[in-house]
Image: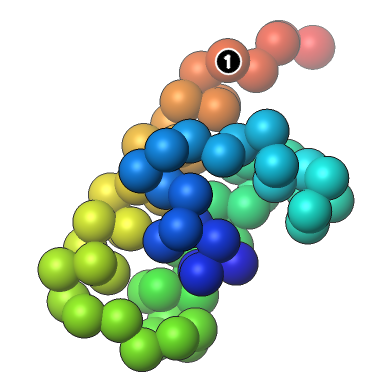
Amino acid sequence: MVDFAIRWGPFGGDEYIFPDFGISVAAFYRRVLTILLQGGGPRIDPETQSALITLCQRRIDTSMAHRTPR
């Protein structure tokens, strides 16, 4: 998941998340964020990790803002 976020983050790629992982965009980025904050996943440099954390937070916020109220 982290590798996917690193590879696709700068370009979008959200349309591939459900087909590849079977979960929503928000769930994907919540999981990636959890992995990063817990120190799991591949070893990445601090700058990349910081950028990914910011990306995850933005994508979570954006996907939650576009949810249809029930």
Looking at the rendered structure, the kind of residue marked 1 is His
| Color style of the picture | rainbow
Please tell me how crowded label 1 is: few (under 14), some (14-19), or many (20+) other residues with Cα within 10 Å.
few
Compare residues 57 and 15 and report the one nearer the observer.
15
Where residue 14 sits, quadrant-wise, is top right
- Location of residue 50 in the rendering, given as x and y in whole percent from the top left corner: 21, 63
Q: Identify the residue shown where x is 68% and y is 33%.
A: 15
Residue that lies at the very extreme toward the left in this rendered image = 47
User: In this orientation, does residue 67 appear?
Assistant: yes
Name the quarter where the N terminus is drawn: bottom right
Q: Identify the residue shown where x is 42% and y is 61%.
A: 6
Where residue 59 sits, quadrant-wise, is top left
Q: Is residue 7 left or right of residue 67?
A: left
Q: Is residue 45 left or right of residue 39?
A: left
User: In this orientation, does residue 57 appear?
Assistant: no
Q: Is residue 50 left or right of residue 62?
A: left
Circle 1 is placed at which residue position? 66
- Location of residue 3 in the rendering, given as x and y in whole percent from the top left corner: 51, 69
Residue that lies at the very extreme toward the top in this rendered image = 69
Relative to 42, residue 56 above or below:
above
Q: Identify the residue shown where x is 38% and y is 74%.
A: 37
Q: Is residue 26 left or right of residue 17?
A: left
